Image (spheres, grey):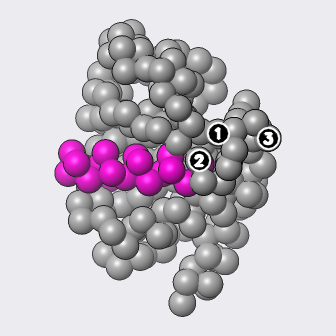
Amino acid sequence: MMKRINEIAIELVMGDLTDQPDCTAIVNAANAELVRGGGVDGAIHRAAGPELERESSALGPISPGDAVITGAYELPNRYVIHCLGPVYGRDEPEDELLANCYRNAFMLAEDRHIETIAFPAISTGVFGYPMEEAAVVALGAIIQTARELNNVKLIRMVLHSRSALRVHEDALECLCEEDK
């Protein structure tokens, strides 16, 4: 599914975040220390090689909502933007912290003149953020921030399952209707 906000395409796909060769940057759902973890983070670190952890760990720790940028090493991208999402029920206000992940990733992308960026569903794995709530927060932040971007032309959310894709499609449709 694809929607346009001004000149920016927002695309939702099911797939592997580490296999997005047409994106200049991918976003990592990182841990505070920016070291190799599980889930999306582990997959990104495995695909990028050990140099990623050497660079990223020197930038940690970060707080929920923060983002930092590194090279992508053996990934087919130029950059990895690492965001620390909130742990649901612990980090408050979780909706604001989650939205800040996306906003701060975009600010780094703008600074580096990145035109294409791919995101996972931040905080929906081991951090326990319910997928439906996270989709509304994430896509709401994406739609709102898209109006302020000058360099980014494609925003892709790469979801791991059909059910996650459907949840995000429903949220995007609903948010775009409200936005009219």
Task: Name the residue at 37% across, 52% down.
Answer: 106
151 left or right, relative to 8: left
CB under 8 Å between callouts 1 and 2? Answer: yes
Q: In the image as oriented, which residue stretches furthest toward the front?
A: 92
The kind of residue on which mark 1 rests is: Pro
**Residue at 41% in and 58% down:** 155
Rate crowding at label 2 as few (under 14), some (14 to 19) or many (20 or more) other CA atoms within 10 Å.
many
Q: Secondary structure at mark 2?
A: helix
Q: Quadrant of residue 99?
A: bottom right
For disc 1, the marked residue is: 86
Q: Residue furthest bottom?
A: 180
Q: Counting residues from the N terminus, which is met first, the one under dot 1 or under dot 2? A: 1
From the top left corner, tell me how far across and down residue 166 is, in percent: 71, 61
Asked if residue 107 lies in the magenta stretch, the reply is yes
Quickly name the residue at label 2.
97
Question: Who's the residue at 37% across and 73% down the image?
Answer: 147
Q: Residues within 10 Å of mark 1 (few under 14, many from 20)?
A: many
Q: Position of residue 94 (x, y in %)?
A: 68, 48
- Asked whether disc 1 touches disc 3, contact meaning CB atoms under 8 Å apart, the reply is no
User: Mark 1: which secondary structure?
Assistant: loop
The spot of residue 84 in percent (x, y) is 54, 34
